[in-house]
């Protein structure tokens, strides 16, 4: 089966359920939804530890025309679908239905990758292109190395967690022991179709930045990251993103997806927005 994103795969949803719902929660991929009170939501969309969200896209393979009927059978009074992509059939279907409220919830910046690095640079605004080249030249004044490891690599994954906590106080709070365990399990669980990898940037033989990302044959989705502020002079976080874009172009990828959030660096690298919607259906 082809899943629209890794967030709809059985291995992702089972790992989410094991960590944040209950152990041995039965995952029925023919109906990957969860009943919370009298509301039906996408499985994986509940806020965990009170406030945190770990699932970037909401979607499912079930026919949206059947969703309301199934929700009523479960005794639900409403359906709330979070982070539905504008290219999802759920958005296309429900936007024309009655008793439905839809509003823009978030954006997910992404880059459509050309065939070469030089062609990518030409897609950037003149100022952004000049800045990127300048920062790459600065990085080249010190010994550095860029590598991509399977997410199951303990050494690379441990560095990712450490760098994530170093990045800022919010990320340090986010990466609680429970959250760290979720990411560890997610990195190691057997996968199909989508895989997970960790990209790292070493400066002067020290890990300075890391990115955990999903990838299939044509798409990379950047899930989590961290960097050491001690190497901020070299724009270490931005440079790792740029080197990963270059790597993905060379591998023939079509899309470099930054997932949710409108951080400035994504647009500095040439990203454009994909709209994400919350769809509320009253039953």
Image (cartoon, helix red, strand yellow):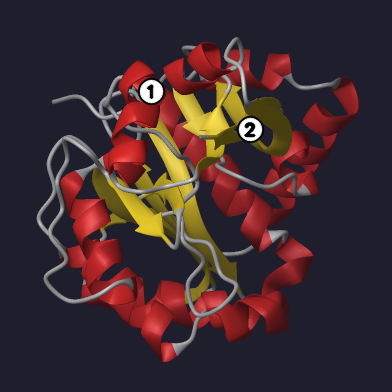
Up/down of 29 relative to 44, above or below: above
At label 2, counting other C-alpha atoms closer than 10 Å, the crowd grade (few under 14, some 14-19, many 20 or more) is many
Q: Earlier in the sequence, mark 2 or mark 1?
A: 1
Quarter-of-image position of residue 236: bottom right
Write the residue at 48% across / 87% down. Answer: 176
- Residue under label 2, please give it: 277
Which marked residue is nearer to the observer: mark 2 or mark 1?
Answer: 2
**Tag count in the figure?**
2
Write the residue at 42% across / 61% down. Answer: 36
Task: Between residue 279 and residue 148, name the one nearer to us.
Answer: 279
C-alpha span from label 2 to label 1: 26 Å
Quadrant for the N terminus, please: top left
Q: Which secondary structure lies at badge 1?
A: loop
- Residue under label 1, please give it: 253
Write the residue at 11% across / 70% down. Answer: 24
Query: Residue 49, percent across and down?
Result: 50, 80
At label 1, counting other C-alpha atoms closer than 10 Å, the crowd grade (few under 14, some 14-19, many 20 or more) is many
**Disc number at residue 83?**
none
Quarter-of-image position of residue 100: top right
Task: Between residue 154 and residue 47, name the one nearer to us.
Answer: 47
Query: Residue 274, percent across and down?
Result: 64, 26
């Amino acid at each position: 089966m082809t899943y629209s994103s890794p967030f709809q795969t059985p291995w992702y949803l089972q790992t989410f359920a094991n960590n944040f719902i209950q152990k041995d929660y039965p995952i029925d991929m023919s109906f990957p939804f969860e009943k919370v009170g009298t509301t039906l939501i996408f499985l994986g969309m509940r806020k965990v530890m009170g406030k945190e969200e770990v699932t970037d896209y909401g979607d499912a393979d079930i026919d949206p025309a059947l969703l309301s009927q199934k929700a009523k059978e479960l005794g639900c009074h409403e359906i709330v679908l979070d982070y539905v992509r504008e290219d999802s059939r759920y958005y296309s279907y429900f936007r024309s239905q009655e008793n439905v409220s839809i509003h823009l919830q978030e954006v997910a910046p992404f880059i459509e990758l050309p065939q070469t690095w030089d062609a990518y640079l030409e897609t950037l605004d003149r100022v952004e292109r000049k800045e990127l080249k300048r920062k790459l030249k600065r990085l080249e004044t010190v010994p550095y190395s860029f590598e991509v490891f399977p997410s199951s690599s303990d050494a690379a994954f441990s560095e990712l967690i450490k760098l994530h906590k170093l990045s800022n106080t919010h990320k340090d709070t986010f990466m609680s022991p429970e959250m760290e365990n979720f990411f560890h399990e997610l990195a190691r669980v057997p996968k199909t179709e989508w895989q997970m990898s960790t990209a790292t940037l070493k400066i002067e033989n020290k890990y300075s930045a890391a990115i955990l990302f999903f990838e299939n044959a044509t798409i990379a989705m950047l899930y989590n990251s961290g960097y050491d502020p001690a190497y901020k002079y070299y724009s270490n976080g931005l440079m790792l993103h740029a080197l990963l874009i270059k790597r993905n172009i060379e591998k023939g990828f079509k899309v470099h997806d930054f997932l949710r959030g409108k951080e400035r660096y994504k647009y500095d690298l040439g990203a454009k927005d994909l709209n994400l919607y919350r769809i509320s259906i009253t039953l």
